Structures are given as structure tokens and as C-alpha cells.
Amino acid sequence: MQLPHRENHLIERIGWLRAAVLGANDGIISTASLMIGVAAASTSSNEMLVAGVAGLVAGAMSMAAGEYVSVSSQADTEAADLEREQRELIQDPAAELDELTSIYIGRGVSPELARRVAEQMTANDVLAAHARDELGLVAHIVARPTQAALTSAATFAVGAALPLAIAIFSPATLVTWTVFGGSLICLAVLGALGARTGGADIFKPTVRVTFWGALAMITTAMIGAIVGRSV
């Protein structure tokens, strides 16, 4: 029998896409906001650039550590659930088969057919069947801490480099406005690319990320100006 073609579903991208979009988005917003906040508190463009470089390095490391710790916790929970499920399968396989049968019945399969399906699925790979249908663990959503950490750090650094590059090549008198405007354009492009890669409509994600980016930069600029006047 000829095997059907393999479909590439967009949900399979969710692990790395989430980390990539989050990293790049945070890189642009946090670095641009930091630079604009420093610019509002100081007249020196050098201080703005130093703040941007520091924000890039610290942010990339923070993103890597945060993602690794967070996703590792998820991976630990998944591993613990699988270990417990394995013990239950050894201790009481009949009850586990009944549980799997009830899951299929709950999805609309007749009791007789549900029982046969459960028996056939467990005959192939009993732990995989329970992991998928009882725990909801499938290959494309299993936690991968190292992948998430590296993706977040790399994309944060790329995102953070954009407002830095804009500042370097901008006239000193317009650097704050060019960083603000250029960062918003980068955020809009990022939102559209992320939505397109994930197969979603591009309008809402683009507006959403641009709005929150603008709000973050404006708020930081206001705080920077207030602190600059105070000190």
C-alpha cells in the first residue's frame, strides 16, 4: 500500500517560533526603550549607545537563562508524568487500558470500537499511546530547554542590534526619534513575519506588537525625563 504524503502542520513550529518571536520582540523593545530612556535623561549620545550595548548583552543572557530554567521545569514535569504513567502501566495495565478506552469513548467513538482501538494502540507502543492521548504529550510540543534558550538568546541579540545600528547611523540631533521610529518599523515587520510563519493573519499581530512597543518606549522616555530632571 502506498503511504500518504506527510503533511507539514504549522503547529510543529510552535516551539522554536514562540522562542524566536519572543526573543526578537523583547530585544527590540527592551533595548530601544532603555536607549530612549537614557537619552531622555542625558544629552550624551555615547551614554545611549553604552546603555544599548549593555542591554543587548545582559538581555541575551537573561533570556537564555530564563528560557532554559522555565522550559527545563516544563521538561521535568513531563518526565515525571511519563515516569508515573510507566509505573501505573506496570502495576495495573487493565485499569490503564480501561482509562484509554474511556478517553476514546469521550471523543465520540463507540464503546466496542474504542476498546479495539485502545488495544491496538497499546499493542504498538503502550507508553506512547498514553502519553499522547492521556497526557497530551506529542513530539512537536515536548519541552526542549536548550533549543529554547539558544533561540531566545540569539534572536534577542539580533533584535537588540537593530536599534543600536539605527542609533549608530543616525544624526546625533535626531537619534532618539530615529531609534523610536526605526524600532517601531522593525517591530511591525517582526510581527508580520511571525504571523506569516505561523500561518496567521498578519494585521492583528503587527498592530499588537507595534502598540505595545510604542507604549514601552514612550513610558520609558517619560520616566527617563523625570529622573533626568531630578538628578
Image: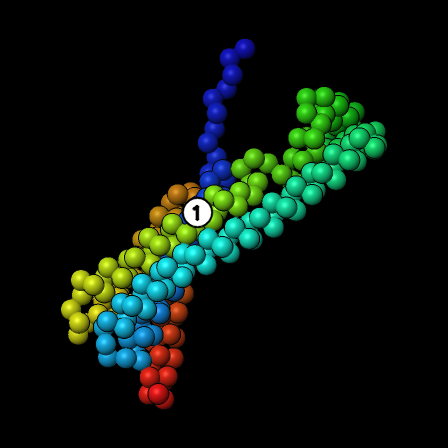
In the image, what residue type sits under mark 1?
Leu
Residue displayed at 52% across by 50% down: 68
Q: In this rendering, does residue 9 appear at all?
A: yes
Q: Is residue 143 above or below residue 169?
A: above
Q: Is residue 69 above or below residue 128?
A: below
Left or right: residue 17 versus residue 144 is left
Left or right: residue 84 versus residue 39 is right
Residue displayed at 28% across by 57% down: 162
Q: Is residue 134 above or below residue 171?
A: above
Left or right: residue 11 versus residue 230 is right
Q: Residue extending furthest left? A: 171
Kindly indicate the quadrant of the structure image that contains residue 42. bottom left
Asked which secondary structure carries label 1, the reply is helix
User: Where residue 196 appears, x then y in whole percent?
Assistant: 38, 45
Q: Which residue is mark 1?
A: 150
Q: In front: 72, or 114?
A: 72
Kindly indicate the quadrant of the structure image that contains residue 212. bottom left
User: Where residue 114 appears, x then y in whole percent?
Assistant: 75, 27
Residue displayed at 47% across by 22% down: 5
User: Where residue 142 appears, x then y in whole percent?
Assistant: 57, 40
